[in-house]
Image: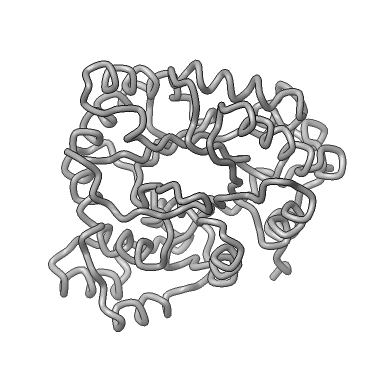
Amino acid sequence: MTDTTPQLRFRDGTAMPALGLGTWQVEPAAVGPMLSTALRLGYRHIDAAAIYGNESAIGAALARALGSGDVTREQLWITSKLWNDAHDPAQVRPALERTLRDLRLDWLDLYLIHWPVAHRSGVTMPSSGADQLSLEQQPLADTWGAMEELVEAGLVRHIGVSNFSIAKLTALAAAVRITPEVNQVERHPWLQQHALLRYCCNHGILLTAYAPLGRAASADGGSLLADPVITAIAAAHRATSAQVLLAWGLACGTAVIPKSVHPELLAANLAASGLCLSPEDLVAIRALDRHHRLVDGSFWVLPDGPYTLTNLWDEVAA
């Protein structure tokens, strides 16, 4: 089956499937069956990251699919991400090469700086502020310069960032040769990020939404999938809440990367690309915005460390 999902276009005309498959928090043992089913259904965009701990399993599954002739490498869109402990320019290419070995690929379609947060070399997850480096100590522009070299070497076709604010995107663009092509951020109806989306659109940066289904319940026990507005729209379209949320993300011109290991949900999520929401639906969903982060970055705020929620997101503290 071929991919029939909407496409987003890069500045050079390259097309990326707008509905992809996330792999965060998927156990290695579950990745193979999930990818096999997803590729058979028609998924062609796979979102991975070194820190997820499952790239070797993803690589094995990709090798089986490519070896069987079910898909070709050119039909696939594979994204991965540079982890925080490899921001030193000398470590960027070795980090990518490890990812390529794990994924059993010669090149990536897209490589992202995972967070605007730097750790000391070898520190996967910091336990104290001493394990972290400030962005003054390890400037993002220096890391980005090494990312540009990956493009020039033919190891990566496009480069971008993840969890970057408007302020960080603006500062980076002023100091580099290749402007970031993608910003992957949390985005769903409870966190719509209108200003960030508008900025990205105006500057030719594609936006990919992670946690597009509202990955976790809110602090008060609520669930985006059970939001009355979403469920009412779903009922009117004879669709699922998840399909409404994904169709909304696609209607906004963003890519969405939902995750599921269940074949029936994988199929239902992919079918969301065929759901057309009405202008009234979009107005009703827009009113749901509450600037509610499910992944708030508080795990980077450590005693005596350089990061605060304010300087991470560049938002005024409430």
Q: How many labels sit on residues? A: 0
Nearer to the camera, 85 or 300: 85
User: Residue 117: x, y in percent?
Assistant: 71, 42
Which image quadrant for residue 87? top right
User: Residue 24: x, y in percent?
Assistant: 44, 37
The N terminus sits in image quarter = top left
Q: Is residue 237 left or right of residue 218?
A: left
Report the colour scheme: one colour
Q: Is residue 146 above or below residue 234?
A: above
**At 20% across and 53% down in the image, what residue appears?**
271
Nearer to the camera, 316 or 87: 87
Q: Is residue 51 above or below residue 304?
A: above
User: Residue 137: x, y in percent?
Assistant: 86, 38
**At 69% across and 56% down in the image, what residue appears?**
169
Q: Is residue 278 left or right of residue 101?
A: left
Nearer to the camera, 209 or 128: 209
Q: Is residue 118 left or right of residue 284?
A: right
User: Residue 165: x, y in percent?
Assistant: 66, 58
**At 70% across and 29% down in the image, what residue appears?**
85
